[in-house]
């Protein structure tokens, strides 16, 4: 009998993923608000990580310190966020917090009830050391709570830090921001450069722009690009749609979205213009546009629809003559991607990030030429809906995103 050399082959054991700590401070602070693109990302991470096997915890910054939730608490928090359930009645501690909205007080009361532990700000690192194993992964994907206390505390507790950067628009376009926002964002990005073990970028364009700034401050953390997924609901039957060709502009009414560009086109067009529906809540630093919207006739060719649920947006988008997106700057650009996923035509500004994600699906025209925009809009208004593109675009998925972000290295 032939025998071996006495050396046992190495036994390969699958590496066990570490525990995960997801920062949900943004979701807590925005309780009761209209859900934005960044909000959707944080909630997508919560949903996905709840379905995965590794131990999962949630960190939330409240008025009086930090709250730590385990998987059971996060399941309940996720249910309340998804189903828009009511929060607990605000307790004494929430009512002592000063000038805060009633919804936030009630949300913090609920979060305290769901927490397995809480700690004063200066005890956050000790809280994490007590409840989380060494080598846990901390994820911050909402641009909130990225303070020195949190980042250094996670490091002290033996955690690794992954931060998702959505854009660096506050630094590139400070004229669109409140002055305090620019200063705060610069400091936040500098802290990311110092403390992060890894940066997750929503696009290659965002990575290039972000690393240009990080390089100025000395350290560029390792990075990975993972396009965001979309969660576009199926259009629900019911509700009334315009019986004439119409165009849609979707997004918060803020300066960089460039609503003024379309308002100028429609003003010069007059009564012969097609119907334009402007969907989105009003933002900030945009009083001139707000005044123009306030002065629009109720039965005119432009109509503002401030707050609509996703179930109403989807049929409006799918049946429109096209989505118009003259935005001046984007980190990712969800509305054009959602429109493309529904087979709706997209006319947008010639931004590198939109070309990166939409590819040949979008029609790109510079916003320096309103004449070209008007000609394209006129031609689309005359084309029947069946002429819209219905295939050829593969929307980025959350499955692909998390395969990239969560793969073991």
Image (tube, rainbow, N blue to C red):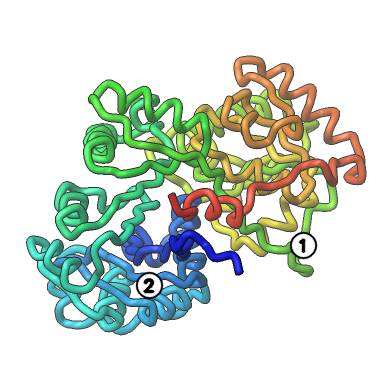
Q: Position of residue 18 (x, y in %)?
A: 36, 63
Relative side of 21 to 290, left or right: left
Quick one: SS at disc 1?
Answer: loop
Query: Which of the two residues, 269 or 71, is positioned nearer the viewer here?
Result: 71
> Where residue 5 sits in the image (x, y, percent)?
48, 59
Report the quarter where the N terminus lies.
bottom right
> Which residue corresponds to the image point at 48% horizontal and 74% vertical from the top-left?
84
Residue topped by disc 1: 240
Q: Earlier in the sequence, mark 2 or mark 1?
A: 2
Callout 2: helix, strand or loop? Answer: loop
Mark 2–mark 1 CB contact (< 8 Å): no
Residue 260's image quarter?
top right
Judge from the rendering whether residue 120 lies leftward or rightward of residue 279; answer left or right.
left
* Place of residue 393 in the rendered image (x, y in percent of width and height, measured from the top left): 76, 42
| Foreground label between 2 and 1 | 2
Residue of label 2: 55
Query: What is the x, y in percent for residue 237?
Result: 78, 68
Cα–Cα gap, marks 2 and 1: 46 Å
């Amino acid at each position: 009998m032939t025998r071996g050399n006495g050396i046992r082959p190495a036994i390969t054991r699958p590496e066990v993923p570490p525990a995960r700590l997801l920062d949900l401070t943004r979701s807590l602070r925005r309780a009761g608000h209209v859900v934005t693109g960044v909000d959707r990302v944080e909630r997508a991470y919560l949903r996905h990580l709840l379905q995965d096997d590794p131990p999962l915890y949630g960190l939330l910054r409240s008025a009086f310190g930090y709250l730590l939730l385990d998987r059971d608490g996060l399941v309940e928090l996720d249910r309340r966020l998804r189903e828009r359930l009511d929060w607990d009645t605000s307790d004494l501690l929430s009512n002592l917090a000063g000038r805060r909205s009633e919804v936030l007080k009630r949300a913090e009361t609920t979060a305290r009830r769901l927490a397995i532990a809480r700690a004063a700000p200066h005890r956050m690192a000790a809280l994490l050391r007590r409840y989380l194993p060494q080598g846990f992964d901390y994820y911050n994907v909402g641009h909130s709570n990225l303070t020195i206390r949190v980042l250094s505390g996670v490091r002290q507790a033996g955690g690794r830090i992954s931060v998702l950067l959505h854009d660096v628009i506050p630094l590139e376009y400070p004229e669109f921001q409140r002055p305090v926002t620019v200063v705060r964002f610069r400091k936040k990005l500098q802290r990311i450069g110092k403390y992060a073990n890894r940066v997750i970028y929503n696009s290659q364009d965002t990575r290039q722009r972000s690393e240009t700034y990080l390089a100025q401050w000395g350290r560029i953390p390792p990075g990975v690009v993972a396009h965001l997924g979309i969660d576009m609901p199926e259009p629900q039957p019911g509700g009334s749609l315009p019986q004439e060709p119409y165009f849609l502009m979707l997004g918060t009414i803020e300066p960089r979205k460039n609503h003024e560009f379309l308002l100028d086109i429609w003003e010069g067009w007059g009564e012969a213009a097609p119907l334009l529906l402007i969907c989105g809540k009003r933002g900030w630093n945009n009083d001139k546009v707000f005044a123009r919207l306030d002065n629009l006739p109720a039965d005119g060719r432009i109509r503002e629809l401030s707050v609509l649920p996703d179930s109403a947006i989807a049929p409006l988008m799918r049946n429109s003559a096209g989505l118009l997106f003259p935005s001046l700057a984007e980190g990712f650009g969800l509305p054009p991607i959602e429109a493309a996923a529904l087979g709706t035509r997209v006319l947008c500004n010639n931004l590198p990030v939109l070309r990166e994600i939409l590819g040949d699906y979008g029609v790109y025209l510079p916003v320096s030429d309103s004449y070209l925009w008007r000609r394209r809009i006129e031609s689309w208004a005359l084309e029947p809906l069946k002429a819209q593109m219905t295939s050829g675009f593969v929307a980025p998925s959350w499955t692909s995103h998390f395969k990239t972000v969560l793969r073991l290295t």
